[in-house]
Image: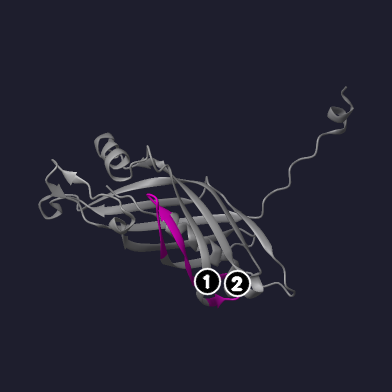
Amino acid sequence: MNHRFASSAILGAAALLVVRAPARAEIMHLQVDTQKSTISAAVQEPLSRLRDVAFAEGTFHISSGEIDGDPADVATTGHVKLVVDLTTYNSGSDHRDRIILSSALETRLYTTAIFESTRIEKVEVVVPGAVGSATVVGNLTLHGTTRQISVPVRLSLSPEGLLTGDGEVTFRYTEFGVKVPRLAFVFPAGDEVTVKFRISATTPQPAASPSKSAAATP
């Protein structure tokens, strides 16, 4: 019965820009790889002390994501916008999924969650050009409510130029108007969600130009 997410977490991707510092100012435009990026959310189960599994964990799919900024001045120019598809919630239990999607997230009314950064704080480069960390602050819009959240992120840059960000954040999903799921309509789940995420981002590949033979075809 986990819900809130990573969308918040996803924000962490903006901080990825901190690991690259070119000789001159340059705005980078990165695209989140939605197939390689992951988000999971965990909420304490009802009567968790009496059950073998204390937390229910599920995943969401990131619909899209864009990261922009000058790697030499991440704190001032870094910006990220991420969209999470709430209808893709999957905990491995059809019964739980139906409850979360219909009664808690109410995806018939709110199909997506959106995070857009407003600033990046606590930028720290551990290994220049390779490893670092930062805190991404931004607005998370969930269940029709927008609130500010802060997400700490660990960053890395591969020799091939793949930017990745890992982290987790915990917050009260009830502050966004999401109802607490209940077992047998009586025993409530926890009112906090812990979101864990891994975001991958790369420079968008230019669209392939049509071949000469194709262009010559009438």
Q: Is residue 83 magenta?
A: no
Few, some or many C-alpha atoms within 10 Å of disc 2 (few <14, some 14-19, many ≥20)?
many
Q: Position of residue 31 (x, y in %)?
A: 61, 53
Closer to us: 29 or 208: 29
Q: Amino acid at mark 1?
A: Ile
Image quarter where the C terminus lies is: top right
**What mark, if any, has residue 32 been given in the picture?**
none
Residue 14 position (above or below residue 216): below
Q: What is the CA distance from the residue labelled 1 to the residue labelled 2?
A: 7 Å
Magenta stretch, main secondary structure class: strand
Q: In the rendered structure, which disc, 1 or 2, sits on the residue that comes first in sequence?
A: 2
Closer to us: 6 or 128: 6
Which residue is located at x 29 percent, y 42 percent?
100
Q: Position of residue 69 (x, y in %)?
A: 64, 66
Q: Position of residue 109 (x, y in %)?
A: 38, 40
Report the residue marked by disc 2: 74
The answer to whether mark 1 and mark 2 are in CB contact below 8 A is: yes
**What secondary structure is marked by label 2?**
helix
Which residue is located at x 64 percent, y 60 percent?
161
Q: How is the image coloured?
A: one colour
Which residue is located at x 49 percent, y 63 percent?
12
Residue 16 position (above or below residue 143): below
Report the residue marked by disc 1: 120
Q: Using the rendered view, name the quadrant where residue 97 is placed.
A: top left
Query: What span is in magenta?
Result: 124-148
